[in-house]
Amino acid sequence: MVGLTIGKVAERAGVKIDTLRYYERQGVIAPPQRTGSNYRVYDWDTVRRVRFVKRAQELGFTLAEIKELLELRVTESASCADVRDQALAKVADLEKKIRSLQAMRRVLSKLADKCVGQDAPLSACPVLDALDEKGKVQ
């Protein structure tokens, strides 16, 4: 049986072996063929697929969203517009997260600005007070 071992796929795709096993359990990559001694044997397309998954993750796609993209790729009735819709939905999701992160940054900056300094007792710490619900986080 000609193919790649799990170690070779991991090396060529730039991931850890555990990542490949996880992707297999999640259905992102197909279960590989097995040798007579039960070793996994992958084809070259698995390397390409794992690289696709990693690039999509770098853009913020979840594994569930990546599975949808991969399914679109093999769906005859799917079009580029379907993929664009997925990308635009991800952009909207990212914009929402950015707004949330910016709000968190503003609150933390305000709390840090209220800090009176190094010599102040922890009982006067506005950050701890806000997290402990003594103060108001806004």
Image: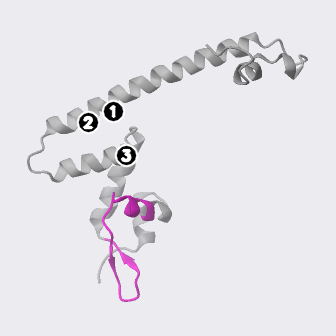
Closer to us: 123 or 111: 123
Residue at numbered disc 2:
86
Residue at numbered disc 1:
90
Amino acid marked by disc 2: Gln
Residue at numbered disc 3:
55
**Distance Cα–Cα, label 1 vs label 2:** 6 Å
**Distance Cα–Cα, label 3 vs label 1:** 14 Å
* Render colour scheme: one colour
Evaluate if marks 3 and 1 touch, with contact meaning CB atoms under 8 Å apart.
Answer: no
Evaluate if marks 1 and 2 touch, with contact meaning CB atoms under 8 Å apart.
Answer: yes
Give the quadrant of the C terminus: top right
Question: For residue 84, which quarter of the picture?
Answer: top left
Question: For residue 37, which quarter of the picture?
Answer: bottom left
**Distance Cα–Cα, label 3 vs label 2:** 15 Å
Q: Relative to residue 41, is residue 19 drawn left or right?
A: right
The residue positioned 44% from the left and 57% from the top of the image is: 14
Mark earlier in primary sequence (3, 1): 3
Mark earlier in primary sequence (3, 2): 3
| Magenta-drawn stretch contains 25 | yes
Instruction: Give residue 118's position: percent from left, percent from top.
Output: 87, 19
Residue 35 numbered mark, or none: none
Q: Nearer the viewer, mark 3 or mark 2?
A: 2
The magenta region covers 21-42
Q: Relative to residue 79, is residue 23 drawn left or right?
A: right
Amino acid marked by disc 3: Arg
